[in-house]
Image (cartoon, grey):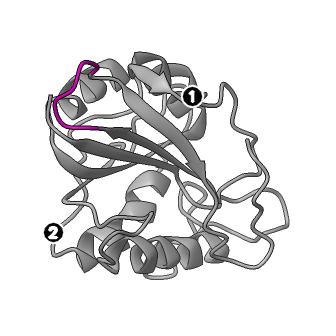
Amino acid sequence: MSKLTLYFIRHAEKPEGSWPGPGLTLDGTKDKESLVIRGWQRAGAWAALFGAGLEGSTYAKPAAVYAATPGTTVNKGPSKRPFETASPLAARLGLEVPNTTYGKGQEATLVKELLTLSGVVLVCWEHQAIVESIIPLLPVRRGKPPTAWPEDRFDVVLRFKRKEGGKSDGFAFKELYPRLLAGDSDTPL
């Protein structure tokens, strides 16, 4: 097996009643399926963190960025939030856009593809699908991934690292708390 680091983040902040305000598209048009202002701030912070290319960093520079295809959330509106969250990072890395080949409900096919890759990959997805549909498909040899992701947590990175070769092709798991914005927490999920 080749060396692979997978980072999973959930989409950034979304509209929730009167706070944190309305969802807005990149051009400022109100859209309930888009990020709120704080979500756009977080998307920029993720781009700065993962796009810095600091060698030996806990937050390595991805060679590929995946986001759920906009409009694929079953029984809900066409959420653009995973794509909007990952787009600033993709742009900083010189990618035209995040890879949106897969949508919500296609997690098994996504994981199958991810497991064939090498290097560093970041995936931005809907939080419940990450813990319910993606994590159970990853062979974890060390660490205990979360089984739930609270609605109000947008500040966590789930890292899965697979070493090259060796007897096991499983991943070592670690939960990371970069605390990019005021109010972010270092409390485990």
Q: Position of residue 61 (x, y in %)?
A: 29, 67
Q: Quadrant of residue 33?
A: bottom right
Q: Which residues are magenta?
A: 163-168
80 versus 68 height, above or below? below
15 versus 53 height, above or below? above
Main secondary structure of the magenta stretch: loop
Left or right: 92 as drawn, with respect to 7: left
**Amino acid type assigned to the residue bearing label 1 in the image:** Val
How many marks the image carries: the answer is 2
Residue 179 drawn in magenta: no
Q: Which residue is mark 1?
A: 131
Residue at figure coordinates x 48%, y 17% from the top left? 136
Residue at figure coordinates x 57%, y 72% from the top left? 42
Q: Which residue is mark 2?
A: 96
Which of the two residues, 70 or 113, is positioned nearer the viewer here? Answer: 113
The alpha-carbon separation of the residues under discs 2 and 1 comes to: 28 Å
Q: Quadrant of residue 183?
A: bottom right
Which of the two residues, 24 or 107, is positioned nearer the viewer here? Answer: 107
Q: Would you call the spot at circle 1 few (<14 residues within 10 Å), some (14-19), or many (20 or more)?
A: some
**Amino acid type assigned to the residue bearing label 2 in the image:** Glu
Residue 166 drawn in magenta: yes
Identify the image quadrant of the C terminus: top right
122 versus 29 height, above or below? above
Q: Is residue 29 visible?
A: no
Residue at figure coordinates x 64%, y 60% from the top left? 177
Give the numbered dot on residue 115. Answer: none
Give the SS element for disc 1.
helix
Q: Position of residue 125 (x, y in %)?
A: 46, 43
Q: Position of residue 152 (x, y in %)?
A: 77, 51
Identify the image quadrant of the N terminus: top left
Give the SS element for disc 2.
loop
